[in-house]
Image (cartoon, rainbow, N blue to C red):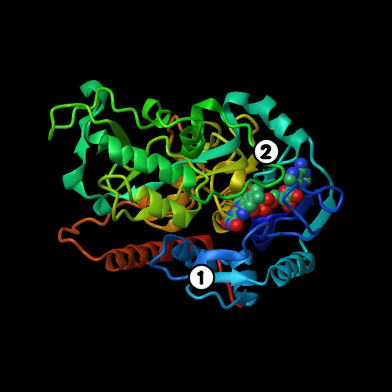
Amino acid sequence: MGGGLAGCEAAWQLASRGIEVVLREQKPIARTPAQVTDHLCELVCSNSFRGAAITNAVGLLKEEMRRMGSLIMACADETAVPAGGALAVDRERFSAAVTSRLDAHPLISRESVVVDQIPNGFAIIATGPLTADALAQALVERVGSEHMAYYDAISPVVSADSIQWDKVFKASRYDKGDDDAYVNCPMNREQYAAFVEAVVGSKKVPARSFEEIRYFEGCLPIEVMAERGVDTLRYGPMKPVGLTDPKTGRWPYACVQLRLEDVAGTAYNIVGFQTRMTWPEQARVLAMIPGLETAEYLRFGSVHRNTFVHAPKLLTPWLELKSAPGVYLAGQITGVEGYLESAASGLMAGLFLSQRIHDESFDPPPATTALGALLRHLWTDRKDFQPSNVNWSMVPPLEGLTRKVAKRDKYELYAARALEDLAPWTQRQRVEATSV
Ligand SMILES: Cc1cc2nc3c(=O)[nH]c(=O)nc-3n(C[C@H](O)[C@H](O)[C@H](O)COP(=O)(O)OP(=O)(O)OC[C@H]3O[C@@H](n4cnc5c(N)ncnc54)[C@H](O)[C@@H]3O)c2cc1C
């Protein structure tokens, strides 16, 4: 179900393994509010698949997908346009390339239908962030409304080694809980006032017409709080109570909290800092937070209209809905974020369903790879589970890396390790690398 990034890739992966596929897409009968064409695999916004170099986690993901015979990567490479260090495509030619390859495959047929029920039997639901209402409702009835969201609220993530540790302190509120879990960035009155002013005055990503967002009070973007009054943030995510700064022996005027993002302690998210500020503005404004002046962002914050499920609770490790055996989920609806990540999850759902149909055992990609990292994001249960792009905080740190290495060198080592670990796995999957 769904002829977007994930659905097309999943169909291709299944058919490549000898399985007959019917691809059900609502176009041209209906479109999502973001779509403007009747083509498959429409890129609804940017034409960029982001960084191309493998020292970038999404660049590594691309390379792994090529090695897994990805349809999306074959068509993206074939229709690439000059974009500096990124991979961007001619969107019309990209959609046409995907469509013609699917249509030429003897095992794939297409049907135009607005799916409104959870199917019986083997299926992959890949209907995306703007899944049509009736199907979304059918999913809610199956999984429970508390496990499905219509907006994401993503806080930025910074790398631990980019924090200025002499300006921050570790402590949990009223010393309750694990001290190592929280890092506190204290602010005085002047710093706080300047910060609030900068948030209010910053450039935001404009809401699309269908995004007349009714925010949940529990996860308001910081700029919405800042606009409500100068003290609102100080009573919200920047609340200082119970956080004694060891340098002063007192609670600061305001305090930004960072929470551990991964077990290895390589990354922290900025608690409650979901935002619609543009990425350059996030880099500029958040640098006013003491300790984050030179922060490296592994992920920026965002708030979008986005239908997704609480994957760690609802899905098996192989992306099958626990409440509907045989029905797999793929793409943005699982809680991955971005064109490439959605296609990658389609690739994996196609692979896992084919393993099931062929009665083979489940064989996930290694944790050190970008594919494996993305999958593990969907496995890791947390109360505030939110969609995510692939990023380096998701891979296990390199063992034995004792000295401080330059960021680029470190990521080169991550990428080399990933591709080395990927090789035996791809061999077991009996795939041929994508050729353009
Ligand atoms: C407004 C907007 C802008 C975005 N901009 C970007 C960006 O610039 N870069 C980026 O990387 N990501 C962006 N995203 C995220 C982007 O949607 C995903 O990265 C990607 O398209 C998700 O892939 P998918 O296959 O899960 O869903 P989609 O690509 O959306 O595919 C889902 C398909 O399912 C079909 N469908 C929906 N409901 C039904 C139904 N009931 N029956 C049959 N078919 C159905 C839809 O018509 C669609 O073709 C944006 C999302 C939105 C909403």
Q: Earlier in the sequence, mark 1 or mark 2?
A: 1
Residue 31 vs 116, above or below: the answer is below
Disc sitting over residue 208 in the figure: none
Q: In which quarter of the image is residue 216?
A: top right
Q: Quadrant of residue 77?
A: bottom right
Image quadrant occupied by the C terminus = bottom right
Which amino acid does the dot numbered 1 rest on? Ala
**Mark 1 residue element:** strand
Disc 1 C-beta below 8 A from ligand 1: no
Residue 161 vs 328, above or below: the answer is below
Give neighbour class at mark 1: few <14, some 14-19, many 20+ (Cα, 10 Å): some
Residue 94 x %, y %: 69, 69
Q: Name the residue under label 1.
A: 86
| Direction from residue 385 to residue 415 in the image, left or right | left
Q: Are marks 1 and 2 in contact (CB under 8 Å)?
A: no
Residue 119 x %, y %: 75, 37
Q: Which of 293 and 337 is in front in this view?
A: 293
Residue 218 vs 319, above or below: the answer is above
Which amino acid does the dot numbered 2 rest on? Glu
Q: Which of 78 and 238 is in front in this view?
A: 238
| Direction from residue 263 to residue 35 in the image, left or right | right
Q: In percent of the image, x 62 and y 25: which residue is there?
A: 145
Q: Name the residue under label 2.
A: 212
Q: Nearer the viewer, residue 205 or 378?
A: 205
The residue mark sitting in front, 1 or 2, is 2
Give neighbour class at mark 2: few <14, some 14-19, many 20+ (Cα, 10 Å): few
| Direction from residue 128 to residue 239 in the image, left or right | left
